Image (tube, grey):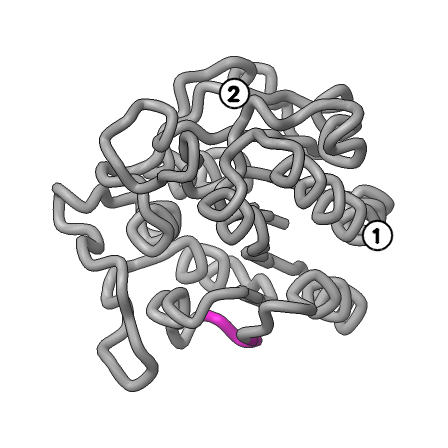
Amino acid sequence: MIISIDALHPEALGENTSKTIHSVMKRGVFTLKGQSTSPPLTLLSHAAMFSGIDPNDGGRKDNSWQSGQKKIGLETIFDDAKSKNFSTGFFYSKNKLGFLISDSIEQHQLDPDFSVENAIAFFKKTDRKQFCFLHVSGLDITGPVEGWLTKGYMEELFFIDENLSSLVELITSKKGFLLIVTSDHAGHGRIHGSDHPEDAKLPLVMLSDIADLKQYQDMNYNVINLKSMLQNILGL
């Protein structure tokens, strides 16, 4: 289970603002030194997570996409999962992320309001090995309006974190799980997507009962590393 919380600044995480994620941090490993793409934008970053390829090395460079346009043509984390007979699901909150849908994704749905519920339903549907990527929006709206790390931003994170609690509980109650919580970018003031160093920051939080993750504690993580990390941890 990979959860990407759009626009999550690593400094926002804490016991009071994100109780659920903080609990995962205490039980697992984490780094607050994650880095996005350059520029740090939603579609560019998620395309790099999926493909392991940076925009400057042949990855996605355009942050806009509309239904009917060409979709990703690179091998992705879902191709890896499908090759190992995982049931695959992708649930997302922004239309532009439809660019990432490929034949290796068995179930996918755009839903800005109930993406978490869709992920929960996915995990309850089958007894097969399951591989799911969930994109959660909200902070990407609050950040540009009220500012990153402001009271309103923290309140939105608190709401998102509470909404994730049932999903996290479901995943961690299963045997043989890997849970990853991360983001695509952050921001500063009311700005994001710039070359300001705050904009590229993001966290990486991981918990598993099947893998020793100690080597990833405090690592210098980049979004292009996700694909190779999953290959190493899960043998994809």
Number of numbered discs visible in the structure rendering: 2
* Position of residue 135 measured from the top left corner of the image (x, y, whole percent): 55, 56
User: What SS does tag 2 mark?
Assistant: strand
Q: Nearer the viewer, residue 51 or 157?
A: 157
Q: Residue at x 49, y 48 (%)?
A: 145
Looking at the rendered structure, the kind of residue marked 1 is: Ser
The label shown at residue 30 is none
Question: Does residue 212 appear anywhere in the picture?
Answer: yes
Question: Does residue 209 appear anywhere in the picture?
Answer: no
Q: Is residue 206 left or right of residue 96?
A: right
Q: Nearer the viewer, residue 190 or 197?
A: 190
Asked if residue 211 is among those painted magenta in the image, a careful observer would answer: no
**What crowding class fits label 1: few (fewer than 14 Cα within 10 Å), some (14-19), or many (20 or more)?**
some
The label shown at residue 166 is 1
Check disc 2 and report the residue beneath it. 32
Q: Residue at x 65, y 65 (%)?
A: 115
Looking at the rendered structure, the kind of residue marked 2 is: Leu
* Image quadrant assignment for residue 187: top left
Q: Residue at x 49, y 49 (%)?
A: 140
Principal SS element in the magenta part?
strand
Q: Is residue 101 shown above or below 37?
A: below
Q: Earlier in the sequence, mark 2 or mark 1?
A: 2
User: Label 2, label 1: how many angstroms apart (C-alpha)?
Assistant: 24 Å
Asked if residue 107 is among those painted magenta in the image, a careful observer would answer: yes
User: What SS does tag 1 mark?
Assistant: helix
Q: Which residues are magenta?
A: 105-109
Q: Residue at x 30, y 77 (%)?
A: 66
Q: Is residue 127 left or right of residue 86?
A: right
* Position of residue 165 measured from the top left corner of the image (x, y, whole percent): 81, 46
